[in-house]
Image: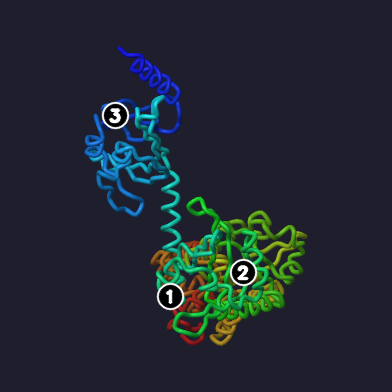
């Protein structure tokens, strides 16, 4: 064996030992394009475990791995990096997608460069392919491309080295009427997107400094003549390893109209909210965290704002009955709105208030929220209860009531706020409905017993059960309960009218 051969084998062995542990993939070839060695990184980048899986030479490699450029065009065999280095070419930064022909689901993106190793006389001795796995970077770039192109907000990307546009999305083309060819490759001098900008000098200064350009109003010249008022902003970014500026735009006319309408609506709501003499609370629908309250709420319930804002309704604890609180929000979740629900609320001082709550579901910053309006009806309810108590005290027997008086009593009671859904007539037994109907006619227990052929004690037991189920405490309240629901309306007769 000649000295040159020994030297070559020794050099290759040393080279292989040096590069075996590199993160870059390395493939060595003979001058006849025979693949003679590859490190672990190169095998991994092709999804194989053994050198033979790459193929014996360039031709077999091409049969086992299909290559495409980043524009999705297939690479012909003569342009495969392994073929080019086999012809002695040196190149760098060739980006290709590599797919195994026996498993098309597995794809890598390689950044490939080549080296031609020479002997002491300068003659080619070995060929080297060096590759980086840039699959992750390429995927991120592809996601950016898709996001940029799909983004409905008009946008262009300008390369800062020469101030030429290298990317434009459909939103910009649709807004302005330009074609893609009219934008790509054009300079900022040919298509001045900062023309007429209200702070043009600041924008140009920031562009030179590769710094963020704040939002500002500008005027775009349109290709068919005329112009369009827009809001433009610039954000520096790196694209394809080059410093660029992403310009984004908003067509100012529809946005301006929407902002004016929204501002006016918010102003009207804010004024009504703040100036209302009735306590109002806004909380999140999902978590019931209090987002805002008006001055009337703080004054009425004697809470400082810091003990209310950011707390949940349960944490504040101003509902006297936790069960009523749970039922109210459950009903609100189901129906989206409630009207005048009687609820007992508690001030910070522990004083109880009778309130009628009306509530509705509103969207605040795209979050479903509840608007609760709480009217203090403590005095009114006390007056009504005193009136009913006085009537019951004077007239213990409902048979003494005239029809006119019963209806007036019903009218007095009907001004009370409706309660949360409670018992229905269907929950009474048939016999209990009969007894309730006769109570509504103004009959006493003895008369009901005679009419239904029941013992007086049995009638009294039915009356007691009816009171319990309807949550009432007297014959007059039972009559009003039925009257408010339109029950037995054709049977309202007093004792003297039968």
**Label 3 – label 1 distance at C-alpha:** 51 Å
Among the two numbered marks 1 and 2 on one chain, the one whose residue lies closer to the N terminus = 1
- Residue 496 picture location, percent across and down: 51, 86
Q: Which mark is residue 35?
A: 3
Q: Nearer the viewer, mark 1 or mark 2?
A: 1
From the viewer's side, name the closer residue of 388 and 375: 375
Can residue 177 be seen? yes
Give the residue number, with chain letter if any, for mark 1: 178
Alpha-carbon neighbours of circle 1 within 10 Å: few (<14), some, or many (≥20)? some
**Label 1 – label 2 distance at C-alpha:** 22 Å
The structure residue drawn at horizontal position 33% and vertical position 26%, both measured from the top left corner, is 37
Alpha-carbon neighbours of circle 2 within 10 Å: few (<14), some, or many (≥20)? some
Question: Circle 3 sits in a helix, a strand or a loop, which is it?
Answer: strand
Give the residue number, with chain letter if any, for mark 2: 215
> Horizontally, is 408 left or right of 438 in the view?
right
From the viewer's side, name the closer residue of 40 and 356: 40
Alpha-carbon neighbours of circle 3 within 10 Å: few (<14), some, or many (≥20)? many
- Residue 269 picture location, percent across and down: 63, 77
Relative to 454, does residue 31 appear above or below in the rendering?
Answer: above
Relative to 92, does residue 494 appear above or below in the rendering?
Answer: below
């Amino acid at each position: 064996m000649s000295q040159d051969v020994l030297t070559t084998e020794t050099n290759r062995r040393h080279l292989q030992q040096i590069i075996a542990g590199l993160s870059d993939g390395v493939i060595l070839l003979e001058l006849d394009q025979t693949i003679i060695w590859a490190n672990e990184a190169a095998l991994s980048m092709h999804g194989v475990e053994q050198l033979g899986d790459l193929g014996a030479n360039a031709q077999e490699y091409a049969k086992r791995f299909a290559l495409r450029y980043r524009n999705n065009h297939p690479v012909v065999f003569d342009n495969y990096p392994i073929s080019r280095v086999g012809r002695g070419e040196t190149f760098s930064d060739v980006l290709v997608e590599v797919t195994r022909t026996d498993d098309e689901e597995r794809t890598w993106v390689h950044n490939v460069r080549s080296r031609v190793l020479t002997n002491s006389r300068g003659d080619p001795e070995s060929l080297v392919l060096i590759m980086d796995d840039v699959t992750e970077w390429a995927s991120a770039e592809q996601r950016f491309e898709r996001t940029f192109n799909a983004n409905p907000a008009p946008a262009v990307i300008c390369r800062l080295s020469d101030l030429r546009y290298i990317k434009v999305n459909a939103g910009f083309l649709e807004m302005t009427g330009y074609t893609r060819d009219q934008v790509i490759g054009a300079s900022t001098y040919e298509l001045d997107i900062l023309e007429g900008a209200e702070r043009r000098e600041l924008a140009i200064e920031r562009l030179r400094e590769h710094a963020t350009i704040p939002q500002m109003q500008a005027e775009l010249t349109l290709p068919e003549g005329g112009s369009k008022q827009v809001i433009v902003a610039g954000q520096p970014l790196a694209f394809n390893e080059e410093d660029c500026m992403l310009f984004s735009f908003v067509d100012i006319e529809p946005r301006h109209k929407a902002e004016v309408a929204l501002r006016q609506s918010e102003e009207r709501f804010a004024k009504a909210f703040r100036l209302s003499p009735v306590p109002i609370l806004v909380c999140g629908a999902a978590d019931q965290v209090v987002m805002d309250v008006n001055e009337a709420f703080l004054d009425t319930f004697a809470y400082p704002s810091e003990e209310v804002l950011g707390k949940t309704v349960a944490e504040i604890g101003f509902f006297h009955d936790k069960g009523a609180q749970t039922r109210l929000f459950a009903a609100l979740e189901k129906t989206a709105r409630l009207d005048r629900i009687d609820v007992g609320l508690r001030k910070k001082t522990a004083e109880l208030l009778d309130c009628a709550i009306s509530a509705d579901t509103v969207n605040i910053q795209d979050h479903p929220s509840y608007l609760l309006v709480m009217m203090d009806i403590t005095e009114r309810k006390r007056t009504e209860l005193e009136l009913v108590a006085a009537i019951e005290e004077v007239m213990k027997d409902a048979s003494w009531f005239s029809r006119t008086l019963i209806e007036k009593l019903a009218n007095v009671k009907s001004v009370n706020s409706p309660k949360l859904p409670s018992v229905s007539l269907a929950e009474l037994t048939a016999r209990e409905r009969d007894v309730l109907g006769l109570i509504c006619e103004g009959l006493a227990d003895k008369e009901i017993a005679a009419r239904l052929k029941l013992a007086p004690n049995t009638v009294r037991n039915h009356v007691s059960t009816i009171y319990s189920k309807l949550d009432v405490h007297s014959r007059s309240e039972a009559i009003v309960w039925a009257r408010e629901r339109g029950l037995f309306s054709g049977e309202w007769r007093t004792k003297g009218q039968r």
